[in-house]
Image: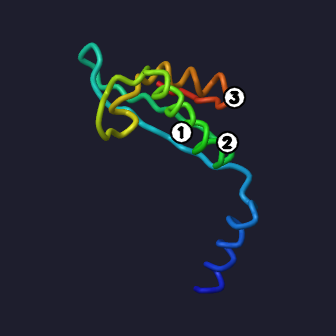
Amino acid sequence: MARIIHTIEGLFRVGGIAASGARVDVKGRKDGQQRIISYGVADKMARLTGIPAAIGAQLLAEGRIEARGVFAPEGCLAPQPFLDELSKRGIEIHRLE
């Protein structure tokens, strides 16, 4: 087991993984119908962590985040403007409805 873990750990340490991914499923009702909208992205981990954080910091510095206190991103950011900012920086989000 230690050998397997050490091998996998080595992949992460030397950047052997070309891309990472994320997916969010939003479930709810619209017009009385059950709906699921899925958002997915694949890119380098550094871009998927650094760029969203930088956008959040920029929006905060510009006064475009009105919420005060401690929030998860989805609690204080409007989704579409945030997704638009990601797109401007080359992170392509795929939407499936």
Which amino acid is tagged 2? Asp
Residue designated by label 2: 43
Q: Which class describes the residues within 10 Å of circle 3: few (<14), some (14-19), or many (20+)?
A: few
Mark nearest the camera among 2 and 1 is: 1
Q: Is residue 75 above or below residue 11?
A: above
Gap between marks 2 and 3, in whole Å? 10 Å
Colour scheme of the rendered structure: rainbow
Q: Is residue 46 above or below residue 53?
A: below
Residue 42 picture location, percent across and down: 64, 41
Residue designated by label 1: 53
Identify the secondary structure beneath mark 3.
Answer: loop
The quadrant in which residue 50 appears is: top right
Gap between marks 2 and 1, in whole Å? 15 Å
Mark 3 vs mark 1: which is more N-terminal? Answer: 1
Gap between marks 3 and 1, in whole Å? 15 Å
28, 59: nearer the viewer: 59
